[in-house]
Structures are given as structure tokens and as C-alpha cells.
Amino acid sequence: MTDRAPVAVIVAMEAELRHLTDRLTPVSETRRGPWLDRAMRYGDLPVQILCCGIGMINAAAGAEHVCDHFSPRAVLNFGCVGAHTRELLPGDVVIGSATVHHGAFHILANGETYFPDAEYSVTGETVASNLRPCDPDLVALAEAATADYVPDPWAIDIGWPTGMARRPGKVAVGVVASADIWTQFHERIDELHARHQSLCEDMEAAAINRVCGRHHVPFLTIKDVSNNEFHAVSKLEGDIEALPASEIGRRSAEAILLVLDWLASEG
């Protein structure tokens, strides 16, 4: 056992998080305001766990709590995403090379949208670029750690696209787009992909990455695809049942465990 700074893991939903915590050793739990801080270990590696809740505000608040209170050596995020390309299918895994807040844009007087591609100033105050790289060392580590990882095929009866041959999952590397938006309109998804080169969308990663950047804490996100709206339209009115609890986050949690193996071996 050592007194190393912990690796923190921040995830939106307990249904996703349990795929990781079931593989870790509990140490302690502490309630601090709205947050349940779970100290765990992976071998001798201390891991600080937080379920932040769904959405950008919850994610940013949770990341600020973790970075301020625990001073982690790195922050990892995983969970489920919707695909931004027709090729990515349920069960595929995306290592985030960068994150982008795709909901941060201007609606101009003519009704067109303008997305700032770079840092800009508002009356002398700097507004950071909405595109932020993930830590390059962690991205490289994740690529190496998952080089031989083949995600399990997605089950046919829980959303595999009709008429498509079932296949094992694959690992891709690219931009994760984030906003409090679930995009189903095909033309909009194509526009987002063309604008940002994004592979997928979630509701947390960009917010966590931004807060980690302000604290100078390395950040990595790994996601698994739960839905591809090009092939099967999810029902979003009322309770959402498009995300099977047995599968969402499972493959990205497996990839995170491979990253933790490497981090633990680094000492």
C-alpha cells in the first residue's frame, strides 16, 4: 500500500459505474454535501470514484469537487455515447483524443449558427476554445493498453441494427462531442461530424475536461456506443429505455481497467 495521489473516475450513471466498481476493492465512503465519495483500490492503486449525475452542469460540479478535494494524479471518465458516424455500432469503444462542447454556439441575426473555432475575447475576457485535447500521454497509454482488446458483440435483442451482420466491437480514437442534447436528426449529426470530426456524443466529457484543465489535472475519456440513430431511432419521449443497464458502460469500463493496469504498474 502507498500514499500515492489517487486516480479519480467520474461517471454519469450508477448503471455505468457498477461495471467498474464491481472490479475494485472498497476502502471507504464519505458523504460530502450532494456527493458520495468512494475511496477504492485497484491492487495498490488508489482510485477515487464519483457518480456525478447526467448532464454538463452535474459533470462540471462533480469534477470541481474531485479536483479541489482530492488533487488526483489523473481523472478518467467513461460511459455510453451515441454515434456520429454510420460505421460505429453499439458495442464499439471510442478513446477520446479530444472533447468539444457542441452546444456552445451563437445564433446570428439571420438565424444562422456560428460556432467559435478558437479562443476569443469578450470585452477583454478570454473565452476558451470549445475544443480541448485530452491528455496526450493518457491517450497514447489507452491506445497501447487496448491494442489487443476486442469488445464483446452487442446483443441482437437490445438494439443491434436490424439487417446488419452482428460483429465484435472495435476500438476507435477521435473527438467526443458533449452537450445537454441528444441528437437524432440525421442532417444535424452529419453537420456535427463534419464540423468537429466527432465520432460520438455524450453529456459530460467536455465539461469534465474543461474543469480538469483549469486544475492542470490530466484527463482521459473512453466511451462505448449504445445507440446509432442512423440505424435505429431511440424513443426519447417519457422514460428512456434505449440504454440497457446490463450493457451501457461495460465495454468502456473494461478499457478503463486496462488503463488502470498500466497506471498501477507505473508506480
Image (cartoon, helix red, strand yellow):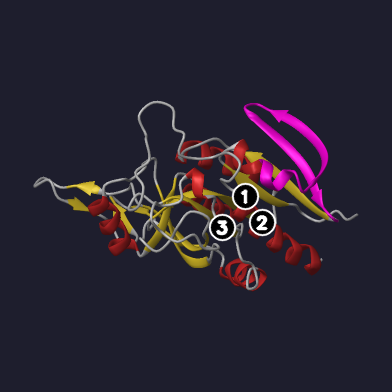
Residue 20 highlighted magenta (yes or no): yes
At 78% from the left edge and 33% from the top edge, which residue is drawn? 29
Q: Amino acid at mark 1?
A: Arg
Query: How dense is the environment of label 1, judged by Cα within 10 Å: few (below 14), some, or many (20 and up)?
Result: many
- Magenta segment, prevailing SS (helix, strand or loop): strand
Give the spatial CA distance, label 3 vs label 2: 14 Å
Residue 188 in the image, given as x and y percentages of width and height: 25, 52
In the picture, the disc for residue 254 is: 2
Q: Nearer the viewer, mark 3 or mark 2?
A: 3
Locate residue 24 relative to residue 172 in the image: left or right.
right
- Camera-side residue of 252 and 166: 166
- At label 3, the amino acid type is Pro
Q: Residues within 10 Å of mark 2 (few under 14, many from 20)?
A: many
Does the magenta run of residues contain 133? no
Residue beneath disc 3:
153
Taking the view exactly as shown, the residue that stands out farthest to the left is 110
